Image (cartoon, rainbow, N blue to C red):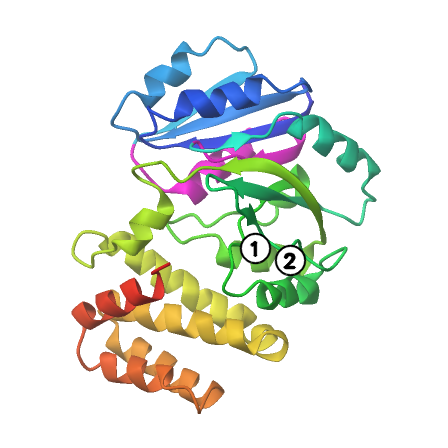
Amino acid sequence: MVMFFSLVLPVYNRERLLPRCLASLFSQDFGDFDVIAVDDGSTDSSLAILKAASDPRLRILGHGKNRGVGPARNTAIAAARGDWVIPVDSDDELAPGALARMHRLCLEAPDSIHALWFRCRMDDGRISPDPAPSAAEWDYRGYIAWLNESRGRWRDMLRCVRTSCLRQVRYPENRMLEDKFHLDFAQRFNSRPYPDVLRLYHQDADNSLVKYLRALDPLRDGEFIRDRCDGLGGLLREHGRALTAIAPAVHGDYLRMAATAALMAGRRGAAFGYGLRLMAAQPLSPEGWKMAAASMVGPAAAQRLHRLMTRT
């Protein structure tokens, strides 16, 4: 049966927070949706909580082992029955009335708009992003310009995307984060940002991505670091020229991230190369010199650099 929305919900060890998320979904005053939850190898009672939920709109899929949020979303999207997909994080909530508002805006959106973006409210009351994006629509150039506009600030938003587009541009099938996915999407499809605050972005999960990134350890998190290294390398190969032309400071940020990830993965040659590129792009900045020098030291120095870069 075709739905208007499919809400895709990756779940990994969120037994404490999952009931809050599910309650926010099934209490919406718009009902034409299903929820596709993918248990991504949880070792706590998350799967049992999903199975105990009584709403018939919930479908549960599973991975035998933890594969990461991108593969979990892809599994859910492959099973989606809705015309539009809304990615939901299991530690967050949809604001009351969010689906009704998105439904109205989706109906109003022309065929040339493929994704709608909405702002979030943090636990401390801050809004992400703040201020709201200045452009009315984003094509590839516009999205990169917004990355530059919002540099150094929270960029988290809630997205509503035409399902047909997500079957063409997939999330990463490894543990790489969404940066390259969003650039790949923007290269092919147009988006429209809205000022509405429709997602409640919580920061109380013990295994939140922000906390995980700050504590990356080359010995413990080697798979994630290697995937991040590969993903950032692909991002720079495929989007580096556009980033350099439209948002050179953002391009420099990605070079720093790629250099640090390469160092943490033990790929010193790649790290040195990113450092040289950073020196060429920003000759007056000491960062390129630091990255090139760190490549002579190894993963321990990279770990310290990474923690400095992710400090808030």
Front residue (pair 47, 27): 27
Locate residue 288: give its quadrant.
bottom left
**Magenta segment boundaries in residue numbering:** 65-90
- Residue 304 versus residue 221 in the image, above or below: below
Q: Amino acid at mark 1?
A: His
Residue where numbered disc 2 is placed = 186
Q: Which quadrant: the N terminus?
A: top right
| Residue under pointer 1 | 182
| Mark 1 vs mark 2, CA separation in Å | 6 Å
Callouts 1 and 2 close, C-beta under 8 Å: yes
- Residue 276 pos. (x, y %): 37, 86
Q: Residues within 10 Å of mark 2 (few under 14, many from 20)?
A: many
The three-letter code of the residue at mark 2 reads Ala
- Give the camera-side residue of 235 and 22: 22
Residue 80 visible in rendering: no
- Disc 2 secondary structure class: helix
**Residue at 41% of width from left, 88% of height from top?**
279
Q: Position of residue 174 (x, y in %)?
A: 38, 49
